[in-house]
Amino acid sequence: MEVTEIKPVNVSEDRQEAVDDSDFLGELEPVTFVLSRKEAGERLDKVLARCLPAYSRSRIQKWIEQGDVTVGGKSAKPKQVMAGFETVVVVPRLSDEETSFAPEAVDFPIVYEDDDILVVNKPAGLVVHPAAGNWHGTLMNGLLHHLPASTSIPRAGIVHRLDKETSGLLVVAKTLEAQTDLVRQLQARTVHREYLALAWGETPPEGTVSAPIGRHPRNRIKMAVLETGGGRHAVTHFTRVAEGVLKGLPVSLVVCRLETGRTHQIRVHMQAIGCPLVGDPLYGRAHLADVFPRQALHAYKLGLIHPKTRETVSWMAPVPADMISLIESAEIPIEGEWYGTDSA
């Protein structure tokens, strides 16, 4: 079998064995194969898997289905059997994952911006970082578009995250120095983060949940309190600010302050004390899932030490309209600093 210009896959020799569907295909130039008599009777996808060991058979099969492979100048068929001596041309395509770290015009409200940091009021529904199921249209894509220089900063300057359906404030670094400083502040717990949440049940007037959080042992998309080891130290302080009734059941409006920042931390800790968040699809009450289309959680306050000026700065993001309507429907008065409109 003759292979014409096999190297356009652009994979270095020391990386060949490690390459999988998440690796880049370099220049994406067409690769041409001239088959020999030995390939007669073999399926095309098997032949290509042997000729292009850097890529999985499923990846190759997808190229065939998309019309990116031709045999003798005609579009290949998924289970096509080779007769031998055909000319096969493969035009590699980047996967969604490979194109996810690209600039995109994504709208997101900016609360504050200077030469070192940017503070975003993330709306519910916006994913922070590309991941399975959400490779495009994320905050990171928007940051790469808004700040082209952020391509040189890990994660485009993102130092902490909010769940997709959680709204509110997060800070982004615009320089590597600012990112390093903010990460250290998070580790030192000098970043002040407060959330407003509506939870089912009557919470204590105030309290602290100190319970390690790790991956749920049976449901891998969930987190859980792991008392027997394996979890990471997690601490949430909460204060009940009002009580109400929703669907005939008691609810509590609480302010939560994070001491640590684990995945789903507030959602898991509130469930652990028997007061899951209203609307939470993972940790809430399934029979009441239609009450609110997302977890009732908003990161309304953010404070930190500015990485350049060393001044203590803070911002507030008013509770979004959907949560205000929910709180009103629970017969809770709309009052408190979280309903303000000005950032400090």
Image (cartoon, rainbow, N blue to C red):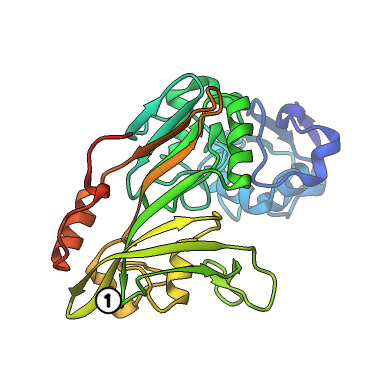
Check the picture and name the quadrant holding the N terminus: top right
Q: Position of residue 103 (x, y in %)?
A: 47, 28
User: Residue at position x 57%, y 69% from top?
Assistant: 220
Q: Is residue 237 at all visible to an observer of this figure?
A: yes
User: Residue at position x 44%, y 25% from top?
Assistant: 145
Task: Classify mark 1: residues with Cα within 10 Å, few (<14), some (14-19) or many (20+).
Answer: few
Locate residue 94 relative to residue 50 in the image: left or right. left
Q: Position of residue 281 (x, y in %)?
A: 37, 68
Q: Helix, strand or loop at disc 1?
A: helix
Q: Position of residue 312 (x, y in %)?
A: 47, 33
Q: Is residue 129 above or below residue 2?
A: below
Q: How many marks?
A: 1
- Identity of the residue furthest to the right in this view: 14
Res 292 quadrant in image: bottom left
Depth check, front residue: 196 or 286: 196
Q: Is residue 132 above or below residue 137?
A: below
User: Residue at position x 57%, y 53% from top?
Assistant: 78
Locate residue 67 relative to residue 320 in the image: left or right. right
